[in-house]
Image (cartoon, grey):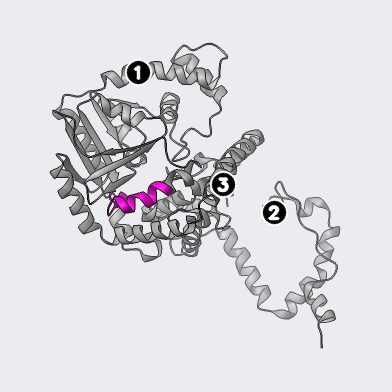
Amino acid sequence: MSTKHSIAAARFIANRKQEAWHDETLWMVRAKRDKMSHSLPEWERLRELACDIKLYSNSHLDTLLEEFEKNAIANGAIVHWAKDAAEHNEIVERILQQHNAHTLIKSKSMLTEECGMNEYLFGKGYDIIESDLGERILQWMHLHPSHIVMPAIHIKRQEVGEMMERVLGTEKGNSDPTYLTHAVRKNMREKFLTADVAMTGANFAVASTGEIVVCTNEGNADMGTSFPKVHIATFGMEKIVPDQEALGVFTRLLARSGTGQPITSYTSHYRKPQDGGEFHLIIVDNGRSDILAKPDHIRTLNCIRCGECMNTCPVYRRSGGYSYTYFIPGPIGINLGMLKNPEEYSDNVSACSLCLSCSNVCPVKIDLGEQIYRWRQDLDKIGKASSEKKIMSGGMKFLMERPGLFNTALKFAPLVNKMPRFMIYNGLNAWGKGREMPAFAKESFNDMWKKNKVK
């Protein structure tokens, strides 16, 4: 039985050149991460510290968030609390209304994607401008991110060039990255200068100081917040860290893991409003507190959104971000989707080879692959287990519980090697699509063991 993910993945894989290019590009980023991690003798110690700090922070959210709020208010910020996506979007709209604002310029934020904020505000007549280059490209192409750090990684420069010919009137056939970047920069300059309100996400929120930290490579968050008098920063409540000493652990891990850099080009700290301006902070729950009640999956709240689990995942690299049905793809997206709505997003748990590479590279040591395995064990309980796989598992169980039958089957198994090809490679053989089946050995391991074992 085909699932939604497998159907979308098949469409992506049908373009073999795109599949190979996407795979190689993401693996290149993974290789850069490995080079960075090997350059730090204390790398594994940093990962352990990051995991411990996150587990502490997420088990002390009540006190840390209150400490953050107290210090943020003392800094002159205005703090809002949103229980869900709807409340988050209403708070943003209310701030825009209070300032008679029409244009909002924002840096990259997966939380606003999660809340569907852009679509909500567009529907209310507001103009939302993405300032991250990848996000801006996607906005012009009416697409959503396919990766949480490199949102347009699936789009080749030739496609970008063709799009910009239509949108910006760039030179026909010119897809030189530097030329296209300058064209976008020229277009964005006026947007930065004339926007009514700026918006950012937050990579980290520091409880002891009431500040937020935003990490970018383009400086777009800094540029966006430099001109408007109103800055809205929105973040999930799990982004809290206790103090600046803890923050240092994460800033050493984030860029090294996500893009293979020692640190992001811009690591900006926001604490106070501009003179005569306002600094609004929105702390969002939207299901995060529910995760705290799930011991088997609590470590998903450790995530610092570096995207490394996607870069290393053999399934994501070869099937693309759009093959997943949850808005965040890859291993972390599989787990977050299941925590959000297991019935709706259960198709994604098959998009995993259980190689556990994601767990091995995660900078905050989330047991991503192990959690996916646990989700798979529960599929039958929610009526989402594949009937085909259940029949196959039942057949294997029947065979292996009967040694005589099992050994007889082994004895005759080599006959399959002589069967006509059409009897082996057909619609019932998923493995045989694009792969050759291994040949059965003339002598089984059981027979070899009995013959050669020392008496």
Q: Which badge, 2 or 1, is on the more N-terminal residue?
A: 1
- Specify the quadrant of the image occupied by residue 339: bottom left
Q: Are marks 3 and 1 in contact (CB under 8 Å)?
A: no
Task: Indicate the amino acid at tag 2.
Answer: Asn
Callout 2: 10 Å neighbours few (<14), some, many (20+)? few
Amino acid type, label 3? Lys
- Which label belongs to residue 429? 2
Picture coordinates of residue 344, whole percent (x, y):
42, 50
| Figure check: 142 above or below 353 | above
The answer to whether the residue labelled 3 contacts the one labelled 2, judged by CB atoms less than 8 Å apart, is no
Residue range highlighted in magenta = 237-252
Q: The C terminus is located in which quarter?
A: bottom right
Three-letter code for the amino acid on which mark 1 is drawn: Arg
Quadrant position of residue 100: top left
Residue shown at 47% from the left, 63% from the top: 374
Could you tell which of marks 3 and 1 lies nearer the N-terminus? Answer: 3
In the rendered view, would you say 434 is above or below 146?
A: below
- Identified at 22% across, 53% down, the residue is 65
Q: Which residue does the numbered mark 3 point to in the structure image?
A: 35
Q: Secondary structure at mark 3?
A: helix
**SS state under label 1:** helix
- Residue occupying image coordinates x 19% and y 30%: 274
Between marks 2 and 1 in the image, the one whose residue lies nearer the viewer: 1
**x, y (%) of residue 316?**
55, 45
Mark 3 or 2, nearer chain start: 3
Please say whether residue 87 is one of the residues in the magenta stretch: no
Please provide percent x and percent y for residue 242. 27, 54
Front residue of 156 and 72: 72
In front: mark 3 or mark 2? Answer: 3
Q: How many marks?
A: 3
> Label 1, on which residue?
189
